[in-house]
Image (cartoon, rainbow, N blue to C red):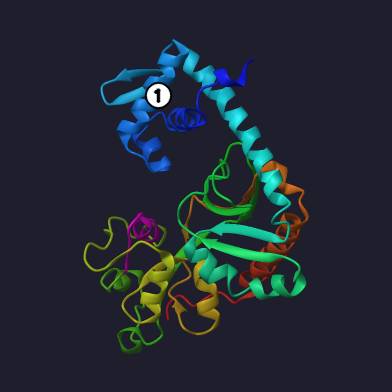
Amino acid sequence: MDLRQLPALNALKTFEAAARHESFSRAADELFVTHGAVSHQIRALEDELGTPLFLREGKRVRLTDTGCRYAKDVRAALMTLADATREVREGQRARRLVVSSMSSFSARWITPRIGRFIERHPEIDLELLSTNALTDFTRDDVDVGIRFGPGRYPDLHVEPLLDEIAFPVCAPTFAGGALPKTPAELAASPRLLRSDDQMWRTWFEAAGLSGVPEPRRGVLYQDSSNLLQAAIDGQGIALIRRSIATHELAAGHLVRLFEIDAPNASSYWFVCPPPLFASARVQAFRTWLLEEVERFRAQFTARPSPSDAR
């Protein structure tokens, strides 16, 4: 085929994003363009191909059968192109390793431990990318991601790292040191808010108290690291993930309240594009990371259980 007859690359990238999301609006957000720009690109592509790729149903769209087949092939071709581009870039940054993770996990779990990796691998230039946005390996210049979620990440190499639980913590001086002695007392204490979960309700159910509402007043924290800092500063009681709280508990900046855990459906996962998995720098980071995970597990397994109340 004459390559000059191929649709424009921008149109194919727009189509791939719209097909993956089955939403022009989400594709527009991902590509940092307007909804109208996506719609125009898709319409022009359909005109060029002479067939509809989407069915428009009011404000919703869904792929036609032809669109489904074409989306699969276009995505495979774009992934091949992305891999080829990555290989070329590899020669320019063979020493550089870019690792993406949630801001809270990067600040509270990776950073206190990363010195051991740097000492072991001075030949690697490590870049820690702290972001709560999901990495798109076909677009972002990232080698490894540490994701917190269900573990379903198509087209990537995925390995489990850590299961997660949550429990309440506060500063030892909170309320003048008069800390709650029962979960019922905790329910009446100032509790800090997270914006994206209902974990307080889950924790109270685990404690045998149903119907305790989520906090409604106060600062709404988007990031767990900021939430933890607020607890350290004595602003209230935080329900925090174990991986985020452990370092501050060991340092005495926080105390844990009660031997009751709230289970979490999400876990931490090591992810990377399959072509990168065998690279020396990714393997070096993976080996170190798994060692640190085992060290962390040993620490909280060996640590005596907290008392029923502080």
Q: From what the image shows, is residue 29 above or below residue 261?
A: above
Magenta residues, start to end: 192-204
Q: From what the image shows, is residue 180 above or below residue 25?
A: below
Asked if residue 264 lies left or right of residue 42, the reply is: right
Q: Position of residue 102 (x, y in %)?
A: 50, 59
Residue drawn at the location 40% of the way across and 36% of the way down: 27
Q: In the rendered structure, which amino acid carries the disc numbered 1? A: Ile
Q: Position of residue 59 (x, y in %)?
A: 27, 26
In-front residue for pair 281/258: 281
Instruction: Please say whether residue 62 is visible from this viewpoint.
Output: no
The image quarter containing residue 236 is bottom left
Q: Residue furthest left?
A: 217
- Any magenta on residue 66? no
The image quarter containing residue 226 is bottom left
Asked if residue 33 lies left or right of residue 3, the reply is: left
In-front residue for pair 165/37: 37
Question: Which residue lies under the disc numbered 1?
Answer: 42
Residue drawn at the location 35% of the way across and 23% of the way down: 61
Secondary structure of the residue carrying numbered label 1: helix
- Any magenta on residue 198? yes
Q: Position of residue 207 (x, y in %)?
A: 40, 62
Asked if residue 158 lies left or right of residue 25, the reply is: right
Q: Quadrant of the C terminus?
A: bottom left
Residue drawn at the location 28% of the way across and 59% of the way down: 214
Instruction: Please say whether residue 105 is visible from this viewpoint.
Output: yes
